[in-house]
């Protein structure tokens, strides 16, 4: 069980999580969803103990994070956190990396060797087992990082965008199979953050929709679809939840195509439009990778952003 | 000429005895040995790594040879052999993490104090005997259990797994701090060598103070920096300095506790010697300051485990540590030179 109680976290003076409380039961798979900048990654980091909240606290199986050395070690033994862009040892071979991670979580060698073989096979990395990770492709690096998280045998898994990062369809299918198996066995407590509703349906027991640093809804996918939205797709239901009263007026204006003057634009992030700005009102975009976004102008209204073009 | 040749031969022989066929240093030999029923209590197939009577015979014969031709310093080959053996044995001793390597280094300083060759020979002889006895212990590294322990050492695992996993693992995969005894020994030895160097290089009391003080201050700078780097690498503050001032949260006890020891170390390094020198003397005051600074550096709070697990820090698990914040504003709304970190979106 993971329980976040009254979590408040701000970067600078910008609040990201506002007095947020969330309880994930043992054996449950919960997906955290929401627009960019809603606080998904921050929430996961706080749950994982990587980030201390400015107020509030996190309980894992009833033990409070960072309360004492013994409890923290006990929590860490049963918890694994995989960030969206995990920092892995590139000079290590795939096998040596998995071996090292497994040993950090004190998995007995006999089980570890067997486990590593199965994971490498699952992610189709057997041919690259003894090659250094630095030579892997982006997707393969993501796969080895996922295998690293799975090799720990942790019963509490916190995975930030596990399906992103260049994972190929086979990798997505393999990970879905593993997560579905965990979800069905009801032995693992899993929290994942993903912006793709299609991947969550049929996988997550419940979905927490994050908007403006707060939980806008926390229900099963079916409940979300049939709730106030009434028989819509999960994506639409989430969009409507997010664009409620708390929606950024600029974003809403762009989405509805109303109020946009002659000046309006879209922000393209990794090949897909993520948000719009218009009418000379400023809007902030935050990200934390080394890549640069591509900017373009939308041809139509904010609702139907045109193809992604680089103005340069 | 004969003396020089014998000296070079003795030096080479000393190094060869210490390093030439030690299984800790020769991977192929070690692997072969581990595949046999050999145990550290048994003799080694390529010969012993500690000093034996045959060494005494060889070195004694060279001394007798020089004595027979009425050479000026017949003990020199013996001194050369002992120096080479003591220095050479530091390598396997250090690799096997034997405490004796430290004691040997500390003891080597004594050799610089006596003014006669006989005194040096006696001091070196005692040192070589101690080193020779310790060399036997290095073979314990070849016990199967010890080998396994070496492989699974936290630091090695941390390097292989990368900080992404290592920093949130239940096992401490970072730098483990030395034990109290080790810290005491190392700090004492650094202070001792500072004393010896100042003693050996200076010709006047003023010069002694200058040299000792320079070493002490330099050491303080290194150890304070090292301590801050060790504690703060991958474990950043939850709030930056600017934000603290902005939010008026000047103190964050859970995080700031890690800065107390470096501040104390810097204070001692800077002020203890000048204040106490008139009372206890230049050399002693500098040695005590150095000892205290290094001891605090090795063992001062917060304890590594506490800081890693309970400290109020943000753990870095991603390659990019500080989130890059980009503000996007229509270019018309801005005037003057573009601000750093601001990107402009083309407008229609």
Image (cartoon, coloured by chain):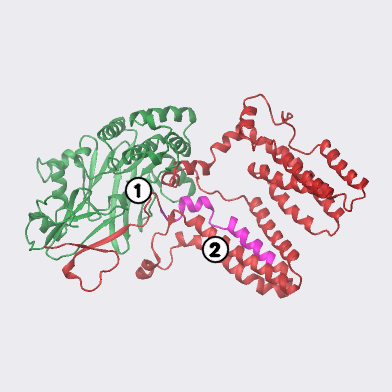
- Numbered disc total: 2
Q: Is residue B310 magenta?
A: yes
Q: Which residues are magenta?
A: B286-315
Q: Quadrant of residue A310?
A: bottom left
Chain for mark 2? B
Q: Between marks 1 and 2, how big is the CA–CA gap?
A: 31 Å
Mark 1 surroundings within 10 Å by alpha-carbon count, few (fewer than 14), some (14 through 19), many (20 or more): many
Rendered location of residue B179, percent (x, y): 62, 49
Front-most of residues A101 and B129:
B129
Of the chain colours in the picture, the one used for chain A is green
Q: Nearer the viewer, mark 1 or mark 2?
A: 2
Chain coloured red: B
Q: Is residue B254 magenta?
A: no
Q: According to the image, label 2 marks what residue?
A: B262
Residue occupying the point 39% across, 37% down:
A148
Front-most of residues B27 and B326:
B27
Question: Is B94 situated left or right of B166 in this image?
Answer: right
Residue lying farthest top? B37
Q: Quadrant of residue A31?
A: top left
Residue occupying the point 70% across, 71% down:
B209
> Does residue A248 appear anywhere in the picture?
yes
Rendered location of residue B255, percent (x, y): 45, 60
Note whether B270 is above or below A28 in the view shown: below
Question: Is B75 situated left or right of B99 in this image?
Answer: right
Q: According to the image, label 1 marks what residue?
A: A47
Note whether B110 is above or below B26 in the view shown: below
Circle 1 SS class: helix
> Does residue B127 appear anywhere in the picture?
no
Rendered location of residue A34, percent (x, y): 22, 49
């Amino acid at each position: 069980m993971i329980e976040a109680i009254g979590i408040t976290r701000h970067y600078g003076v910008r609040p990201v999580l506002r007095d947020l409380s969330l309880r994930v039961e043992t054996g449950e798979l919960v997906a955290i969803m929401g627009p960019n900048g809603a606080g998904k990654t921050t929430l996961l980091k706080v749950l994982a103990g990587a980030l201390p909240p400015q107020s509030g606290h996190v309980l894992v199986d009833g033990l409070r994070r960072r309360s004492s050395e013994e409890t923290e070690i006990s929590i860490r033994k049963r918890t694994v956190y995989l960030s969206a862009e995990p920092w892995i040892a590139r000079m290590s071979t795939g096998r040596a990396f998995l071996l090292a991670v497994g040993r950090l979580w004190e998995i007995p060698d006999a089980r570890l060797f067997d486990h590593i073989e199965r994971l490498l096979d699952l992610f189709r990395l057997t041919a690259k087992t003894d090659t250094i990770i630095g030579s892997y492709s982006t997707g393969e690096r993501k796969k080895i990082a996922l295998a690293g998280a799975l090799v720990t045998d942790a019963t509490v898994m916190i995975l930030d965008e596990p399906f992103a990062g260049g994972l190929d369809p086979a990798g997505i299918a393999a990970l879905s199979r593993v997560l579905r198996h965990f979800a069905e066995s009801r032995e693992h407590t899993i929290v994942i953050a993903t912006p793709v509703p299609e991947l969550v349906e049929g996988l997550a027991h419940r979905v927490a929709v994050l908007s403006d640093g707060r939980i806008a809804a926390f229900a099963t996918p079916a409940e979300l679809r049939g709730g106030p939205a009434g028989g819509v797709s999960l994506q639409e239901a989430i969009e409507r939840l997010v664009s409620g009263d708390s929606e950024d007026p600029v974003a809403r204006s762009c989405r509805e195509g109303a109020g946009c003057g002659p000046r309006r634009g879209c922000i393209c992030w990794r090949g897909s439009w993520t948000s719009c700005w218009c009418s000379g009102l400023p809007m902030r975009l935050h990200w934390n990778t080394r890549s640069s976004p591509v900017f373009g102008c939308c041809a139509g209204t904010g609702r139907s952003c045109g193809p992604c073009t680089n103005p340069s | 000429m004969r003396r020089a040749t014998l000296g070079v031969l003795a030096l080479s022989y000393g190094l060869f005895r210490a390093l030439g066929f030690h299984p800790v240093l020769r991977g192929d030999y070690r692997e072969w040995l581990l595949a046999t029923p050999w145990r550290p209590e048994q003799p080694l197939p390529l010969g012993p790594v500690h000093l034996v009577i045959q060494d005494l015979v060889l070195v004694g014969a060279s001394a007798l040879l020089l004595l027979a031709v009425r050479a000026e310093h017949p003990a020199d080959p013996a001194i050369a052999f002992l120096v080479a053996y003591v220095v050479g044995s530091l390598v396997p001793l250090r690799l096997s993490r034997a405490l004796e390597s430290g004691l040997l280094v500390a003891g080597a300083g004594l050799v610089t104090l006596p003014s006669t060759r006989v005194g040096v020979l006696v001091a070196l002889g005692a040192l070589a005997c101690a080193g020779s006895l310790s060399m036997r212990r290095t073979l314990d590294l070849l016990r199967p259990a010890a080998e396994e322990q070496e492989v699974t050492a936290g630091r090695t695992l941390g390097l292989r797994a990368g900080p992404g996993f290592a920093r949130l693992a239940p096992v401490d995969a970072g730098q483990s701090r030395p034990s109290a005894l080790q810290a005491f020994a190392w700090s004492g030895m650094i202070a001792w060598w500072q004393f010896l160097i100042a003693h050996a290089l200076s010709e006047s009391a003023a010069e002694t103070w200058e040299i000792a003080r320079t070493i002490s201050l330099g050491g303080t700078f290194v150890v304070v920096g090292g301590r801050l780097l060790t504690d703060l690498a991958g474990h950043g503050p939850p709030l930056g300095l600017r934000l603290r001032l902005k939010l008026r949260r000047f103190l964050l006890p859970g995080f700031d506790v890690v800065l107390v020891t470096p501040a104390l170390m810097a204070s001692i390094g800077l002020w203890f010697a000048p204040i106490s020198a008139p009372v206890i003397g230049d050399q002693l005051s500098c040695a005590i300051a150095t000892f205290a600074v290094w001891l605090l550096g090795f063992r001062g709070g917060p304890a590594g485990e506490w800081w890693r697990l309970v400290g109020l820090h943000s753990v870095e698990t991603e390659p990019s540590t500080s989130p890059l914040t980009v503000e996007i504003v229509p270019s018309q709304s801005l005037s003057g030179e573009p601000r750093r970190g601001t990107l402009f979106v083309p407008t229609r």
